[in-house]
Image: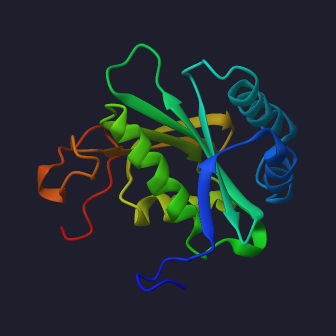
Amino acid sequence: MAKNGQRADLVIHPLPRQERGAILEILSQCGNFTGEELSIAQELIDTWLDKPGQGDYTALSALLGGAVAGYVCFGPTPATQATWDLYWIAVAQGLQGSGIGKKLLQSAEVQIASRGGRTIVIETSSTEKYRPARGFYEKNGYALEARIRDFYRAGDHRLIYVKRMQAGGSDEKKENRRPHGKYRLPDRNS
């Protein structure tokens, strides 16, 4: 560990082609995604790798001691001003909870802010197997803003988390947040 508590051997960089297989394996092994969802993830990764000039998707990879440990994929939301979607974030099973996901998320947030982004949207499932993901988003400053009931299938709701960024890239202070949407969670200090 480095002095600041960060892993000295963690490197986050743009996803290169040679790490594609390892990322797809991480997504497959986590067990949360259907075959259709894995195909979508692969499509986004391949778009990033095969079309370097495109601006729809950015994929970052995390290396720990030289081994692929996780990735994040994000992009600007079409037909919006400064809103971005975080499409995928995944960390190898044995490394979940080690801070790699947080570093990937922070790296995405910095890149989004540097490109003028002010709002980040994450969509996820309401099922029990996604509880750890929802906790992760909430711990990192994302607020539940909407719920679309029975979206994925009966009893599996789409939950939409949002984080608003200031111009400098940090998230807004709680007192500056305005409630949006019917299902906004109360601030923890309320």
Q: Horizontally, is 113 left or right of 71 in the view? A: left
Occupied quadrant, residue 84: top left
Look at the image and tell me in which quarter the C terminus lies: bottom left
Q: Position of residue 162 (x, y in %)?
A: 38, 44
Which of the two residues, 29 or 56, is positioned nearer the viewer here? 56
Q: Position of residue 173 (x, y in %)?
A: 18, 57
Relative to 1, say whether 84 is above or below.
Answer: above
**Residue at 17% over, 44% down:** 178
Relative to 166, say whether 152 is above or below.
Answer: above
Which of the two residues, 111 or 27, is positioned nearer the viewer here? 111
Occupied quadrant, residue 140: bottom left
Q: Horizontally, is 89 left or right of 182 in the view? A: right
**Residue at 80% over, 48% down:** 19
Q: Position of residue 77 (x, y in %)?
A: 46, 24
**Residue at 87% over, 39% down:** 35
**Residue at 60% over, 50% down:** 13
Look at the image and tell me in which quarter the N terminus lies: bottom right
Relative to 39, say whether 61 is above or below.
Answer: below
Q: How many marks overall?
A: 0
Color style of the picture: rainbow
Q: Horizontally, is 23 left or right of 114 in the view? A: right
Q: Residue furthest left?
A: 175
Q: Position of residue 188 (x, y in %)?
A: 27, 68
